[in-house]
């Protein structure tokens, strides 16, 4: 028992001697980074490509700095802390669809005539897409909440990043769209009446807003910290954000917006939030989340 007590006392003394000092510190920083920063999703028929973007903002880190001595006598500096801040994240992606047909059901051409007591103004619009490509851009106000660990010059952070949508938009250029109307009660197709929005329309452009919701992402960052002056440091590292939530807000909409009073001027919605067949709730995409990987520079002032 006596030997055990002596051994425990020696271990406690050794552990106490290993941490020579501990000090609370505050760090304020500005940062900027860039790389692959995209809206990530899968298309039912087609390919998606990621785009480049950036991450810029200000940060605050609260940490405790310690010095630890190993058996060889070498002194290591350790930092443990919490990092947060606020910044702007910019994302982009492109959807390229295979030739395919979307169906918008239950439309009306505005003619209220009845045939044998049945309405004959209702039809299903079959829209064939050829060479359709859509660019999407989004901007989020990002708030990181991350744990930080640093030993000597190496640092690593992990945690979550909350993204509040600021703006989302899409645009499509020079698409070929062919509309055909099937009147179910008449069992009849109309295919060439361009004044009514039917037929082939070349060189169609469209653009609009994307309704986005809050993003929650797993956030990782690691790299090196360099002292460049009195209490001034430069972080150089790599970051990776993996979105966990679907950011496309609300229910899906019809791909073609048809107005009988101006049928030839129909518009199209983003493939991120549209049905391919609204009777089956089939969509062009699955869930959309935000993903980013790149390099980051952070200039920090210690207080």
Image: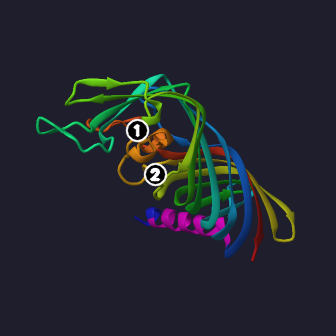
3 up-or-down from 62: above or below: above
Report how far apart the C-alphas of labels 1 and 2 lie in the structure. 11 Å
Q: Quadrant of the N terminus?
A: bottom left
Q: Which residue is mark 1?
A: 286
Neighbour class for label 1 at 10 Å: few (<14), some, many (≥20)? some
Going from the N terminus, do you reach mark 1 or mark 2 first?
A: 2
- Kindly state the secondary structure of the residue where label 1 is placed: loop
* Residue 224 appears anywhere in the view: no
Cβ atoms at labels 1 and 2 below 8 Å apart: no
Q: Position of residue 157 (x, y in %)?
A: 60, 56
Quarter of the rendering containing residue 226: bottom right
Image point (52%, 68%), residue name? 9
| 90 vs 4, nearest the viewer | 90
Q: Position of residue 209 (x, y in %)?
A: 53, 52
From the viewer's perspective, is 279 left or right of 283?
left
Prevailing secondary structure class for the magenta stretch in the rendered image? helix
Q: Which residue is mark 2?
A: 247
In the image, residue 20 lies in the stretch drawn in magenta: yes
From the viewer's perspective, is 183 left or right of 272?
left
Q: Position of residue 6 (x, y in %)?
A: 50, 66
Report the colour scheme: rainbow
Magenta segment boundaries in residue numbering: 5-21
Q: Position of residue 280 (x, y in %)?
A: 26, 35
Using the image, tell me which numbered label, if any, was put on residue 194. Answer: none
| 218 vs 166, nearest the viewer | 166
In the image, residue 45 lies in the stretch drawn in magenta: no
256 up-or-down from 84: above or below: above
From the viewer's perspective, is 250 left or right of 93?
left
36 up-or-down from 232: above or below: above
- Kindly state the secondary structure of the residue where label 2 is placed: loop
Residue lying at the far left in this picture: please name it.
117
């Amino acid at each position: 028992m006596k030997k055990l007590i002596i051994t425990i006392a020696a271990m406690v003394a050794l552990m106490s001697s290993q941490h020579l000092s501990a000090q609370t510190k505050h760090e304020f920083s500005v940062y900027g980074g860039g790389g692959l920063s995209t809206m990530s999703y899968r298309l039912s028929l087609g390919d998606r490509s990621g785009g480049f973007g950036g991450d810029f903002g200000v940060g605050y880190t609260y940490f405790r700095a310690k010095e630890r001595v190993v058996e060889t006598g070498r002194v290591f500096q350790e930092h443990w802390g919490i990092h947060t801040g606020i910044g702007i994240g910019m994302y982009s992606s492109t959807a390229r669809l295979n030739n395919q047909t979307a169906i918008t059901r239950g439309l009306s051409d505005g003619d209220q005539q009845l045939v044998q007591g049945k309405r004959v103004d209702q039809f299903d619009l079959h829209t064939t897409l050829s060479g359709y490509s859509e660019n999407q851009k989004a901007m989020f106000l990002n708030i990181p909440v991350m744990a930080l660990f640093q030993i000597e010059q190496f640092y690593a952070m992990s945690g979550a990043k909350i993204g509040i949508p600021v703006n989302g938009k899409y645009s499509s250029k020079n698409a070929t769209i062919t509309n055909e109307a099937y009147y179910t009660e008449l069992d009849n197709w109309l295919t060439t009446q361009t004044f009514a929005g039917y037929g082939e329309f070349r060189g169609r452009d469209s653009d609009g807003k994307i309704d986005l919701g809050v993003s929650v992402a797993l956030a990782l960052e690691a790299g090196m910290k360099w002292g460049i002056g009195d209490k001034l440091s430069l972080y150089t590292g790599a970051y990776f954000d993996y979105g966990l939530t679907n950011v496309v807000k609300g229910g899906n909409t019809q791909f073609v917006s048809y107005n009988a009073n101006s049928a030839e001027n129909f518009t199209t919605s983003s493939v991120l939030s549209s049905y391919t067949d609204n009777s089956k709730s089939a969509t062009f995409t699955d869930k959309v989340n935000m993903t980013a990987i790149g390099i980051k520079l952070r200039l920090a002032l210690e207080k």
